[in-house]
Image (spheres, helix red, strand yellow):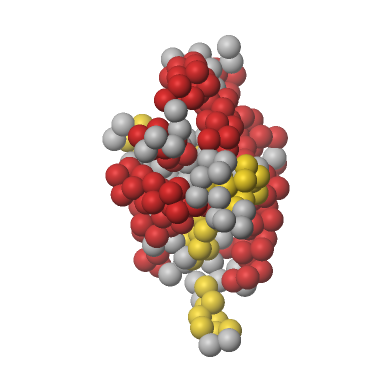
Amino acid sequence: MTTRVIWGYRMKKCAAFFDIDGTIYREGLITELFKKLITHELVSENTWVDAVKPAFMKWDKRQGYYDEYLDRMVEMYIESIIGVRQDHITHIAKRVIEQKGERVYRFTRSEIERHNKIGNMVIAISGSPVELVSEMARKYNFDDYRGTTYVLDSDNRYTGEIIPMWDRESKRKAILDIAKQYDLDLRHCYAYGDTTGDLVMLSLVGHPYAINPTKTLIEAIKKDSDLSKKVTIIVERKDMIYQIPLALVEVDLLKE
């Protein structure tokens, strides 16, 4: 892919956008952060037992949905960090990535390496707290990143307000802003995601990849005639990576 020089530096014309949770990282990074908050006694263990664990157990037994568990986790995280200084969370986020940052899918790790090698920009767009996203971006040599911002007061303490980056419209705006900032041609760009929050991100680029996609994402892709023609579906299980044609994916098999 060719590049051109603007204001004294090289602008890359192609980028690969990656969601993190469930796409690069094999679970949710915010779960690991929440556990560390308990270890550091910033959150009572009762908060996990009473408010989060029931949703986790339903998902773990495949009697509930991961999104429901994750939503509950985010709610408790927001409540738990009100009044906490940002440097505490930044320190804990660094520890999480140091200890857990290698728990990633082989396919997306190899794709990150491939894009870096051929000179494409690599950009994370994630609903995880930006403190975690920045550490993950540093570890995997990303060029830029966007994450959910938890608003601070004048004393650098969290207020409980958030600027999300997990929904479709937030990701749409982020990609369009980044494309303008770096002069990207989205028709030649790549995107990797796993849930409906990534649907717009996948739709905007020329080379979309659905990684271990949720049922709702597959259903949404099937309804989008343009996206369904260009999407690549990747499923990674144990030590195997499968590329599955969309026509062979039967969401009806997943009905209750």
Which residue is painted at 52% across and 58% down in the image? 145
Which residue is painted at 54% across and 66% down in the image? 14
Extreme-bottom residue of the structure: 8
Which residue is painted at 70% across and 41% down in the image? 225
Quadrant location, the C terminus: top right
Question: As rendered, which of 187 and 157 lies closer to the eye?
Answer: 157
Against 251, residue 86 (above or below) is below
Against 170, residue 59 (above or below) is above
Against 7, residue 170 (above or below) is above
Residue 190 appears in the picture as rendered? no
Residue 104 position, x and y percent, is: 36, 43
Residue 18 position, x and y percent, is: 50, 51
Instruction: Indicate the quadrant where residue 146 lies.
Output: bottom right
Question: As rendered, which of 212 and 68 lies closer to the eye?
Answer: 68
Residue 180 appears in the picture as rendered? yes
Question: As rendered, which of 88 and 141 lies closer to the eye?
Answer: 88
Left of 1 or right of it: where is 171? right
Residue 198 position, x and y percent, is: 60, 44
Question: As rendered, which of 47 and 238 lies closer to the eye?
Answer: 47
Which residue is painted at 61% across and 29% down in the image? 216
Against 203, residue 176 (above or below) is below
Number of numbered labels in the structure image: 0
Left of 67 or right of it: where is 120? left
Left of 182 or right of it: where is 91? left
Extreme-front residue of the structure: 155
